[in-house]
Amino acid sequence: MKRIFVLSAIITVITAACSKNSEVTVSSISINNTELKLRIGEESHLKATVLPADATETFVEWSTSDSYVATVSPAGVVTAQSPGTATVSASCGGLSATCKVTVIKPVTAISLSEESLTLGTGKTHQLTATVSPEDASEKNIAWNSSNSSCATVSPDGLITAVAPGTATVTASCGGFSAACQVTVYIAVTSITLNVDKIAFGAGDTRQLTATITPSNATYKNITWKSSNYDIAEIIGSGGVRGRSPGEVTVTATCDGQMAQCTVVVQDFVDLGLSVKWSTINLGATTYYDCGDYYAWGELTTKSDYSWSTYKWCDNGADKLTKYNIDPEFGEVDDKTFLDPDDDVAHVKLGGTWRLPTEKEINELYAKCTWTWQNLSAATGFIVTGPNGNKMFIAANGSIEGTVKHSSTAACYYWTSCLDKNYPSYSIYLFGSKDDRIEDFLPRSWGMGIRAVCD
């Protein structure tokens, strides 16, 4: 009996040892994906591989670090629940492998602030893309132009018009896209007017001319506007008609560009004389402004009032080409009064406006009371007519070459009359604190203009 018992024990020990030696342990475990990106509600089946293949223990246990973000079934099926990240683990035989799961809220739509645009060359426009839902996880937008030679688009949606043509600008995000059709035309880069300041009388009309650059611009329709239609109104395309005394700004607009002209509608005062006198100097906007200076018979202002720049001579006082009665001074035409086309008051103001004659300034001297005034804004005369009406004549001085004389001490205003004794001179109205006379000076000098009308 004792031998049998011992033999049985030996067999049990040997059997147990053999059983232990035959168990195959797990050496590694891996998952077919180490990272997943899923949309809410999406599923993905993860598969775990246990090595060696003949391992004694092959059961894989699945788990998640955050079931609010992603769950995992016993079979390894991962289901996305809400935006965020979670770690899904597969465990077997004391070893584990992991997969990072990112759950995103998907984009459902994308739209643009404009579906179509028309832009001039060189212009820009900011497109705005709106991604839905607002809290989508990924909102990176990719921009693209179908024709970058016509219109380009920056990474943030800024469109730049390059050349005439069409292009489709597309914004894409999360598998969705939206498009804007862009049409590019040749834009106006500038608009200029033939004058920047004009003056004329009430009831008269002047034509403004606008020049558009470039000449081949696509759109050339010009909009004209007056800042005060009670003073000056727009007639047709660029026509301006004076309605009442005052100053307005006329604006020409085309394709976002504009140019402006100051328009002065001249007023007059009836002093009870043979003509009515303007209340302000030509080129002035107020009664105390000196206004512009002109050589006799010229229509434009300039910086040098000398014989070398004078219009009606050939570089010298004895080489006159118009308005001359003496052959010693050049070509003789026997003209002693300015032609209307050379009368700057008439040309600028229109209607019956003109320079006064010698007779008319003598009438102003003889029949009016002249009172010298030192005003805060200017010095000059208050001239009171026989009917009691008044006007102010500013002490404006004169310009010889580039030198200004007596700028606040005397009045110098041209008449329309030539000096018959010395035809390189013309008659002007002179007035100072101590004297008021009809006088004459070289026609090339710059003087003020005080216009009259019938």
Image: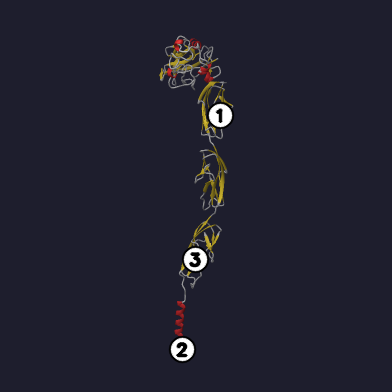
Image coordinates for residue 52, horizontal then vertical, percent:
47, 70
Residue 155, x across and y down, in percent: 49, 46
* Res. 368 mark: none
- Mark-to-mark CA distance, 2 and 3: 50 Å
How many numbered circles does the render carry? 3
Image vertical order of residue 118 relative to residue 83, above or below: above
Closest to the observer, 432 or 151? 151
As measured in the structure, the alpha-carbon distance from the residue carrying label 1 to the one carrying label 3 is: 80 Å
Q: Pointer 1: what residue?
A: 225
Q: Earlier in the sequence, mark 2 or mark 1?
A: 2
Quarter of the figure with residue 411: top left
Q: If you read the primary sequence from the N terminus, does the residue marked by circle 2 or circle 3 appear first? A: 2
Name the foreground residue: 313 vs 381.
Answer: 313
As shown in the figure, which amino acid type bears the numbered disc 3?
Answer: Ala
Residue that carries the numbered disc 2 in the rendered image: 4
Query: Residue 21 at x, y = what percent?
Result: 45, 77
Disc 2 marks which amino acid? Answer: Ile
- Element type where label 3 sits in the image: strand
Q: Residues within 10 Å of mark 2 (few under 14, many from 20)?
A: few
- Do labels 1 and 3 touch, CB within 8 Å? no
**62 over 214 or under it: above or below:** below
Q: Quadrant of the C terminus?
A: top right
Mark 2–mark 1 distance (CA, rounded to whole Å) = 129 Å
Check the image and report above or below for 167 versus 198: below
Indicate the secondary structure of the residue bearing disc 1. strand
Of the pair 286 and 239, the residue shown nearer to us: 239
User: Which residue in the structure is indicated by mark 3?
Assistant: 90
Evaluate whether residue 275 shows in this view: yes
